[in-house]
Image (spheres, coloured by chain):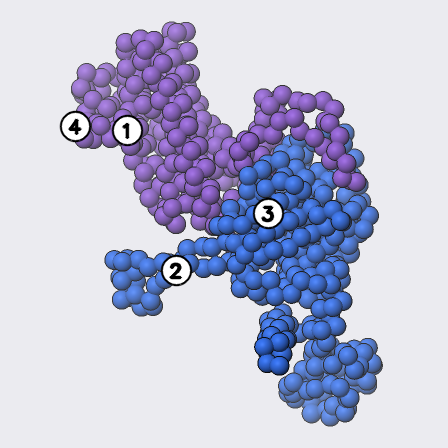
Chain colours: A purple, B blue
Amino acid sequence: MTPDSPRTGSVRTDARGSESPRKQPRSRLRVWSGFARAYALANLQSALEYRVSFATQVFAMMLNDGMWLVFWLAYFDKFQVVEGWGRADIVTLWAVVAASFGLATTVCGNLFRLAGLIVRGELDIYLALPKPVLPHMLMSRMSVTAPGDVLFGVIGFGLLVHPTPGQWILFLSSILTGSIIFVAFGVVSQSLSFWLGNAEGVAEQLTNALINFSTYPTPIFRGVVKLALFTLLPAGFIAYLPVQLFREFTWLRLAALWGVAALALTLAVMVFRAGLRRYESGNLVLTRQ
Amino acid sequence: MNAIVEVHALRKEFRRRVRASGIRGVLQSFASPRQETVVALGGIDFRMEAGESLALIGPNGAGKSTTIKTLTGILHPTSGTATVLGMVPWKQRTQLALQLATVFGQRSQLWFHLPAGETFDLLAHIYELPRAEYRARRDELIERFDLGPLLGTSVRKLSLGQRMRCEIAASLLHRPRILFLDEPTIGLDVIAKQTIRELIRELNRNEGVSVLLTSHDAGDIEHLCKRVIVINHGVIAFDDRVSTLRRRHLQKKVIRIRLNESSVTLPALAHVEVLSRSDYGAKLEVDTRERAVAEVMAELGTLPLADITIEDPPMEEIIAEIYAARSTAARGVSEP
């Protein structure tokens, strides 16, 4: 069994050190959902300690998303099409990106803090506990304001695209693959800290680039940039491919999208595990926030 | 004997960038970075038996925390082997974590903005404790650690000593067999230190929890452990009973006094050396082989005292003595 694999056939040890089989083995899914619920509650309680700050953040997030969408809607008032993409395509693009990013950072709120956690030796707390480090670390902080992004995406898509039930299912699928790719990309870029030392700045730049390129219609890019958007900076898989699916659905494209998401996640786990072997911890005085 | 920790030739190296000072150094380091290898653990060997309370002491940077972090699977060693409860920590980390607990004095596992009780609930999920079992254990720990009045208060509002009591209680919810404590009394005042030491000793005696503790406070080992390993520069300099360490190396105590009046003449005290003297205070060193500290205190009690403290000699001094003793012994062997 690898260091981070979940435990199976667990035994409990009593105070005298003798071992006895656990009475009622619980399913992994139930255990993890209880674990996620407990963390969600703790995060919500922690955020509500500062109510004004919490409300301001939610409002600012909605405003930020809304302003960009208004910009694009104003653009389409003047010009009906950009590289073959119309108003509905751009709204779908924005809705998928916002909801994917929102979902990724709601569930994995530590995603874009990982580089800092590595540098400051803050993975110690997760490594001392009996859970796989990567999912535990990612989930232990949930952004309670990021659901604003998800809501923005869902409401925007529903109001402006008027989707059919089939398109809603496709939208859900696109959010899931998009958030998986965001998480995978975040883990890989932030894990650079294992090798480079302080990679917080690099990781932030890469994340910003991914978000920016995801929110523009990919057909406007050519050559090397386009190649990069389907390899190193997988913005094309977050929004472009899903929009293409809305325009012209094929099962092969859908399977390819899920395949890419699975591949990206596998790669991210491998990179993180390789990096963890180089983890050097630290001696800063720290508390969990 | 039943060994629960076995360490053999455990070595840990870190790479560190070397840079000269000044702008030139910064530019040179940027153009052609140079790295050096720092040996945190230089191939240490030791065993720990079930139920034992063992102290790992040494100055800052000696390798104490690196040892604990390697034995809990946080760090991967460069070479060597180690087993804890029959498991290799860096390969079976999650299974091992179910049976041990780690408390870092400088790193909190409690949520800063939430009451400690909320973190307890979270830990119950992390350790997958059945609800009834968890509640019974939590209530037992609340009573034993006297946490009742603290549980509803945000961790950020607790004193360091209160927080450390909560930290240790949180680490015991899953009934670990081994407790690793990394500087548990760092920064605590005398009373808080005493409380924490009492609680750890009780755990070791009553629940049979094995304790491996790092500290650079000689008081921790004297109060808590029967055996001590002194580590310095990643090498074990001493591994024996605490009574042996005390007999050989903890033979002095430092007494600091602060006086209410200036220029008071100190009485002549046998086997006491005056290390420093000022108008309103003095620093004295007592040779405890020759005189009990209590006797000296009684004599000092006749002075107009504003404050008095008793300290162990600094760890650096003890280690220097250990090394001096070792090199003398080595010379004795090589020079017939």
Q: Check disc 4: other Cα within 10 Å, few if <14, some if 14-19, many if 20+.
A: few
Q: Is residue B74 left or right of residue B48?
A: left
* Amino acid under disc 3: Ala
Disc 3 marks which residue? Answer: B82
Q: Amino acid at mark 1?
A: Thr
Total residue callouts = 4
- The percent position of residue A41, horizontal first and vertical second, equals 60, 31
Instruction: Find out whether the residues at labels 3 and 1 contact each other: C-beta distance under 8 Å.
Output: no
Discs 1, 4: same chain: yes
Taking the spot 81% from the left edge, 51% from the top edge, the residue there is: B205
Identify residue for label 1.
Answer: A231
Q: For the residues carrying marks 4 and 3, which lies nearer the camera in this image? A: 3
State the image coordinates of residue A39 (x, y, percent, origin top left).
Answer: 58, 33
Q: Tell me which amino acid carries mark 2.
A: Glu
Q: Which image quadrant is residue B139 in?
A: top right
Image-based side of B212 in relation to B148, left or right: left
